[in-house]
Image (cartoon, rainbow, N blue to C red):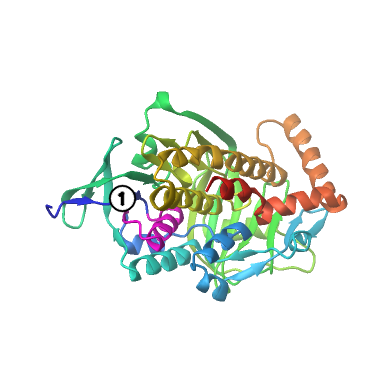
């Protein structure tokens, strides 16, 4: 076969958490696949992304032998704090969930692990290779452009896994009449800040302040992540480092507590939006991660949901190739995943409104503030409410029964 024409069982577009986990699952079951990624290896490893991995995602990674360094170098966390100028409350959610915890471990480090495992076992990743055209038939076909060799390549395959994000070609290749799209745009944004500063806390802090939300997230002993609620039309240019630190000091203020500053290495504006595709498959194309759904950063659920997508899709493909040889098993993908996706969207949406102020009008703001106070009061005083929140926050394994039955 020509050196620009390849054949495999599954072509995976995108070397993010979803694409790489799926690639490892397929490879461990001797199912050939090729991963194409538009960015270079260096760009993939340098992108600052999520860093909070929930109990469910850690359990999945452990199952496939992909969590060794995560468990060794990541830090478990079982508490989070809600604070405002009037109160401070630490929720020990791990104690309410049989000791389950999050792990803080930067996404780029997880990608290093997933890529290393895949390539050490002979897996093929084509970096700097941008998907151009998807032919969704049998066999399916993906045409790509190799930016290093400056040539077009064609990959024939049985199935395509679109793990290339909201702006990738996979999602866009599905005809509009074949999919129902759900959007939610919020009336504020977040300024996301990464700094070479040791954490000033041992647990995540959600600060509810009249000037807007502030968050202190955890990465490792030398790097911290922060969020500031800003206006919808605001930009990074309006936030020099001095203003960032000043505002973080104000919104995170607490008697007896201080914020450690450091060199800010990255600032970006995150537009708060949510998105769900229904279904998340079309013919021989399956969507996972941000190609299938987008969540706000609230609760840190985006990467974790992508990992769950990949595990479910991987199990269904393993069943198809090694057991049933019946593609009806693959048609269950959307039905299995969408209920979990919507449950996670609801949690992220609820937490977002619990910690951010509304910016539409003063009357609405006063109403939303009372709802915020009600939810915090319930977290503090109602064990059943706190237990339900904790289970959703840390990640539950209970909803995997349906998958086990299907596979």
Residue located at (42% from left, 64% from top): 114
Q: Is residue 36 above or below residue 294?
A: below
Residue located at (59% from left, 58% from top): 226
Report how many numbered discs are placed on residues in the image.
1
Please say whether residue 225 is visible from this viewpoint: no
- Toward the front, the furthest residue is 324
Write down the quadrant of residue 115 in the picture. bottom left
Near-viewer residue (137 or 116): 137
Q: Is residue 374 above or below residue 117?
A: above
Q: Is 33 left or right of 275, judged from the image as shown?
A: left
Residue located at (37% from left, 39% from top): 285
Q: Where is residue 17 shown, x and y percent of the image?
A: 45, 56
Q: Where is residue 96 shown, x and y percent of the image?
A: 78, 59
Near-viewer residue (216 or 314): 314
Please say whether residue 401 is visible from this viewpoint: yes
Residue beneath label 1, please? 9
- Toward the top, the furthest residue is 177
Residue located at (60% from left, 45% from top): 402
Near-viewer residue (244 or 177): 177
Q: Is residue 385 above or below residue 25?
A: above
Q: Where is residue 333 shown, x and y percent of the image?
A: 49, 41
- Toward the left, the furthest residue is 2
Asked if residue 32 lies in the magenta stretch, the reply is yes
Q: Where is residue 104 shown, x and y percent of the image?
A: 59, 65
- Toward the bottom, the furthest residue is 72
Magenta stretch bounds? 15-38
At numbered mark 1, what does the secondary structure look like: helix, strand or loop? Answer: loop
Asked if residue 285 lies in the magenta stretch, the reply is no
Write down the quadrant of residue 132 in the picture. top left
């Amino acid at each position: 076969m020509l050196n620009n024409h390849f054949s495999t069982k599954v072509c995976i577009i995108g070397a993010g958490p979803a694409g790489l986990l799926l690639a490892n699952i397929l490879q461990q079951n001797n199912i050939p696949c090729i991963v194409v990624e538009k960015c270079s290896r260096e760009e993939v490893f340098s992108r600052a992304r999520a860093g909070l991995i929930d109990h469910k995602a850690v359990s999945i990674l452990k199952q496939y032998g992909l969590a060794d360094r995560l468990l060794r170098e990541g830090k478990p966390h079982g508490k989070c704090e809600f604070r405002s100028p009037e109160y401070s409350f630490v929720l020990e959610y791990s104690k309410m969930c049989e000791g389950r915890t999050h792990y803080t471990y930067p996404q780029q480090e997880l990608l290093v692990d997933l890529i290393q495992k895949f390539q050490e076992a002979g897996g093929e990743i084509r970096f700097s290779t941008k998907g151009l055209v998807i032919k969704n038939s049998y066999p399916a076909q993906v045409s790509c452009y190799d930016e290093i060799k400056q040539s077009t390549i064609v990959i024939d395959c049985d199935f395509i896994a679109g793990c290339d994000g909201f702006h990738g070609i996979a999602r866009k290749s599905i005809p509009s009449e074949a999919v129902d799209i759900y959007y939610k745009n919020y009336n504020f944004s977040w300024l996301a800040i990464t700094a070479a500063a040791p954490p000033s806390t041992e647990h995540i802090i959600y600060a509810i302040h009249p000037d807007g939300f502030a968050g202190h997230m955890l990465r490792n002993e030398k790097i911290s992540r922060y969020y500031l609620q800003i206006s919808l039309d605001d930009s990074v240019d309006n936030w020099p480092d001095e203003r960032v630190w000043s505002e973080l000091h104000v919104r995170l203020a607490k008697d007896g507590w201080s914020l450690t500053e450091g060199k800010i290495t990255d600032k970006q504006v995150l537009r708060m939006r949510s998105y769900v595709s229904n279904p998340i498959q079309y013919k021989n194309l399956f969507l996972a991660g941000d190609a299938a759904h987008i969540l706000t950063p609230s609760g840190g659920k985006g990467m974790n949901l992508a990992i769950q997508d990949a595990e479910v899709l991987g199990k269904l493909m393993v069943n198809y190739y090694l057991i049933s040889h019946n593609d009806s098993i693959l048609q269950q993908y959307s039905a299995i995943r969408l209920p979990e996706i919507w449950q996670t969207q609801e949690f992220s949406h609820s937490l977002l409104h619990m910690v951010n102020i509304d910016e539409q009008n003063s009357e609405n703001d006063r109403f939303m503030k009372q709802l915020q106070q009600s939810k915090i009061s319930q977290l503090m005083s109602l064990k059943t409410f706190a237990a339900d929140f904790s289970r959703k926050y840390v990640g539950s394994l209970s909803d995997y029964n349906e998958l086990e039955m299907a596979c």
